[in-house]
Image (cartoon, rainbow, N blue to C red):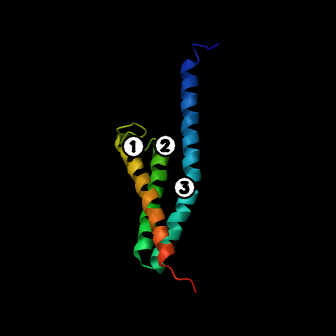
Amino acid sequence: MDDPLNSGSNASTKSGNFMNATLLKALVALVPASMLFSGSTILLFKRKTVSSFLQFLGAGCLVAVVLTHVSEALQLLPWMHWGLEHGVGHYLDLWSAVLGLTLFPIGCLLHALTTRHA
């Protein structure tokens, strides 16, 4: 049975657990996104090609997706209205994900098609 005196603290605990879970997931996702970004940055400096630039842009967009989730979990920049359907943060997250999941694979495909094997 629910205790009416503790219902407010229970809701805040659930909200706190949700934010902690969101932050944990975002920080875990930051590792592979950072690795992709680091690798694409190195590739861009080694080979200044269209494919390496597309990979770099795509990986940067994926890092932006992760950072939007970190910002949402930590409630940074509240004017961005993180998590709301028509908020600026939602569109930043959406378009970063779309661009990242489009540009990075296209860059990888172009790199694979244009790289000659010895």
Mark 2–mark 1 distance (CA, rounded to whole Å)? 15 Å
Residue shown at the point (65%, 12%) measured from the top left: 1
Which of the two discs, 1 and 3, labels the residue nearer the N terminus? 3
Secondary structure of the residue carrying numbered label 1 = helix
Q: Which residue is mark 1?
A: 90
- For the residues marked 3 and 2, what is the alpha-carbon distance in whole angstroms? 15 Å
Q: Nearer the viewer, mark 1 or mark 3?
A: 1
Residue type at tag 1 = His
SS under mark 2: helix
- For the view shown, which residue lies furthest in the right direction? 1
Q: Is residue 36 or residue 77 the one in the foreground?
A: 36
Direction from residue 20 to residue 51 in the image, left or right: left
Q: Earlier in the sequence, mark 2 or mark 1?
A: 2
**Could you tell me the amino acid type at mark 3?**
Leu
**Percent coordinates x, y for residue 104 in the rendering:** 46, 63
> Which residue is drawn at the image coordinates 61% and 13% (left, top)?
3
Which residue position holds label 3? 30
Q: Single out the mark in the foreground, 3 or 2.
A: 3
Q: Position of residue 14 (x, y in %)?
A: 57, 29
Q: Position of residue 66 (x, y in %)?
A: 49, 52
User: Furthest residue to the bottom?
Assistant: 118
**Res. 19 image quadrant:** top right
Dot 3 alpha-carbon crowd within 10 angstroms: few under 14, some 14 to 19, many 20 or more: many
Residue 105 at x, y = what percent? 48, 63
Q: Residue at x 58, y 29 (%)?
A: 13
Alpha carbon separation for disc pair 1 and 3: 18 Å
Residue at the disc numbered 2: 74
Q: Is residue 9 left or right of residue 90?
A: right
Callout 3–callout 2 Cβ contact below 8 Å: no
